[in-house]
Amino acid sequence: MTVETTPSREPQDAHKPVRSGDAHLRIVGAAGLDRILRPLHRWVWSDARRRGEKLLKFAQTEADGGRDIARAAERTHDALLRRLYLRHALDEQRHANLFRTRGRAILREVGQKREDGDATFDGNFFSPGERGLDDLQVDEESEGSLLAFLHLSEKAAARRFAVYQEVLEVDPVTRDVFVDVLKDEAFHMNYTLSQLKRVEPKKAGWRLWWARLTRLWKGYLRIASAIANVMGGIVLAVQYFVILPIFALMAKRSAKKELPGWAPARDGGERSLRSQY
Ligand SMILES: [Fe+2]
Ligand SMILES: [Fe+2]
């Protein structure tokens, strides 16, 4: 797979030129966990309906991210950053359109969308879209922390999309969409890093480490809430299938001891005006 950056489309001096070969190694050579999980990704993307629905979710994330980055362009006082953010926002909007168009086409091909409640596994936990853009809090970030956060999110997205396009032999049209999107993600990944080094040359490393820790913490919270969900399901199932039948049995037994029909009134009840029985 070859990923090309598009230096000619960037504003002058936006970042140091990156050779296409370097970009390829930086993205694909370090894909880590996603490369190990490639068979799982292949399985997730093999189902046409799941593929269509995942692409529609990806489109939402990209569109939301595009809006947030447009907001970042409004906030910044740096003219070069504003131009880059605007270009970035337009790219994310274009990705949203590409994913939405392809997702709808797939769902049209496979027939109606599934019925409500007819849930299937979508694998979004380990094969998400441009994760990170959905966590973006533009108004709460400084210029440096926003660039560090964007850099890590774009890098993770580029790695993931590189793996997705590799496992999509089954659907060459969708694979081409990812190849197209991946070029932009490589550009986003590179410009955010070079701009971080320009805006905060001394703090760039620290910003990246802090952004990494924040992402790790958010990842931990995602895993913890997923585990809590599973545990909650198990506890409810145990209650329903083990504890509830015991109480049902006890209620049945005590019901047998009850006398059928009317129960006799207690002795002397008729003499008391304050008592019903
Ligand atoms: Fe994107
Ligand atoms: Fe991006």
Image (cartoon, rainbow, N blue to C red):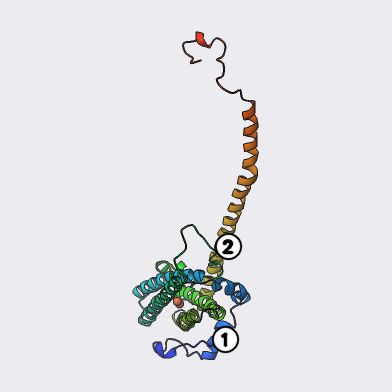
- Check the image and report above or below for 202 versus 50: below
Mark 1, Cα crowd under 10 Å, few <14 / some 14-19 / many 20+, is few
Badge 1 vs badge 2, beta-carbon distance below 8 Å: no
- Check the image and report above or below for 225 versus 197: above
Judge left or right: residue 172 versus residue 37: left
Residue at the far top in the pictured view: 271
Res. 114 visible in picture: yes
Closer to the chain start, of discs 1 and 2, is 1
Label for residue 223? Answer: 2
Mark 2, Cα crowd under 10 Å, few <14 / some 14-19 / many 20+, is few
Kind of element beneath mark 1: helix
- Could you tell me the amino acid type at mark 1? Leu
Q: Residue at x 65, y 44 (%)?
A: 242
**Which image quarter is the N terminus in?**
bottom right
Q: CA distance from mark 1 to mark 2?
A: 29 Å
Return the residue at label 1.
25
- Could you tell me the amino acid type at mark 2? Ile
Kind of element beneath mark 2: helix
Q: Residue at x 60, y 45 (%)?
A: 240
Q: Residue at x 44, y 89 (%)?
A: 7
Res. 187 visible in picture: no
Q: What percent of the width, then of the height, locates residue 201?
A: 48, 81
Judge left or right: residue 213 versus residue 80: right
